[in-house]
Image: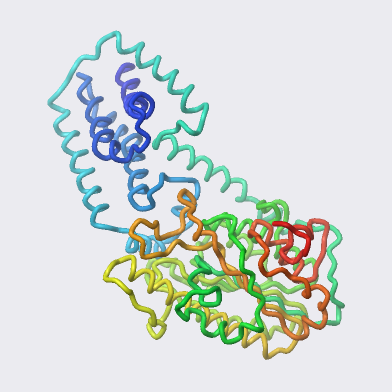
Amino acid sequence: MFNCVLLYISFPFLLEFILKFILNISNLIVFNTALLMPLTLIFPFLFFKNKTNLLKILYIFLVYMPIFINICHIFIFNSEISCASYASMFETNYQEFIEFFQHFISKNLIIFIVLFWLICGLFYIFSKELSYEIDKFKKPAIILFAILYGIFCFGDIRYKFPMEKLIANYIEYKIEQIKDKNLLKIMKNFSFNNVKSLIKNDQSELYVIVIGESANRDHMSLYGEALKTTPRFDSIRDELQIFENVRSKYCCTFKALKTILCFDEQLKNGDIVTLFKQAGFKTFWLSNQYYIENSDNITTIISLLCGQKVFVNKAHRRTKLSSNYDGDLVEHFAKFVHDSAQKKVIFVHLLGSHFPYANRYPREFDVFFPTQNTKKSREVARYNNSILYTDYILFKILNIIKLLKINSYLLYFSDHGEDVTEDPESPHCHNESIASPPMFRIPFIIWLSDEYKKLNENFIKNWDLNKQYNTGDVIHSIIDLSRLNCDSFNKNKSIFYENSSK
């Protein structure tokens, strides 16, 4: 049994070691699908006389299954599974899973899955009829390999194989989740030092921060796209401050939101909602993102800190497979705006251009059509339609704000971008493992009321709209734009600081 266990554990590592270090093969996907998987499964079964079914089943699920999952991820995203992948998987819901499956399933992936499990079943059946005795000299060889494996793999992340990456990245994800899990109570008692406002107490203030989803500015006519994807904002271009060179720090939502909402990407260092509350603002959270009950994700934690919150999207319920459009937010937004509080900040979290893009807009916004009869071309057209609908929603929100004629602003930016082109080789998504430039290119747009301009004339006159900036520091920009201050605020990290060199 000792030999059996050693070989079961060591054989896949040994084979991968030979392929990667002795044969110097860096792209293992072909070998994983065509060679590594069948050999990994069949060889241990052939080596032993006393092969128990339990051991075979454990081997399949603990060794073979992780490789299978990793390679499915490679098929879909052209990259191995990462910590961000786990966050996307475990911080999702039934509706988002269905949409993901519909978007990324392909004929090749189905063929691979069928062949994989067919071969797996055949090996399991045929191995019952075969047996070989393991030679005594192989035992020390396996132990030697285990030592070498530890030196190479555990000592340097560059040498980790799919199996270890799967496990290591899951552990990393769980560690981050555990760190955040019990922070809500701590955050409710968090206190910033020396919080103050530069605006007089008798002034009414309304600040609206709209966080988009997967919006790439290259697809917006406001930023030069030939198609009129933002016609409403184009019509009021002179009223807008359009920052040309802002990038998201991350291209996955949960990491991006941490940089946007928290100081130094850590909930324990304080968040923007708590700061506004200490400055005397009534806080509102309005979202069309999928709400996951009893979750410890960043949006759930931050929303619970707000005075009022509304999640209009109820697609987390298993009985409902259709998600809401962002237009469903507008009615709730109007109610928040007319709340009696003198100082209000409203966070609006759009579903925006989250795939599948065709689900993000009503059919009357089906304006742009594919230029080629290909799946990529159809997706580009649908993505542009989702941008068109976002422009419509932002314009409706802005018109509600304008009617108040008070000191106010609207700030819109996206959590990250999206790689959407007709190029058959493009990843067509956002994925941290690939991290192509379009996944970071986001819009950053500000509208200011006349009242705001009068009160802050000196502050706004030297803004550099071409400044290179990333959302890793955007919490400082929000504080600056809201004319607040505290000990945690660093003006050098604000996009509005004229001598900043971000």
Residue 35: name its quadrant. Answer: top left
* Residue 84 visible at all: yes
Q: State the residue at coordinates (71%, 89%).
A: 404
Nearest to the observer: residue 483 or residue 377: 377
Q: What residue is shown at x 48% (from left), y 71% (from top)?
A: 219
Color style of the picture: rainbow
Q: Is residue 320 visible?
A: no
In the rendered structure, the answer to whether residue 177 lies left or right of residue 479 reads left
Give coordinates of residue 235: x percent, y percent: 57, 87
Q: Residue at x 44, y 53 (%)?
A: 89
Residue shown at 33% from the left, 48% from the top? 72
Q: Is residue 249 left or right of residue 170?
A: right
- Residue 86 image point, x, y percent: 46, 49
User: In the image, 345: left or right of 321?
Assistant: right
The residue lying toward the viewer, choosing from 228 and 171, is 228
How many numbered marks does the figure carry? 0
Asked if 387 appears above or below 186 in the picture, the reply is below
**Residue 347 percent coordinates (x, y):** 63, 71
**298, above or below 37, in the image:** below
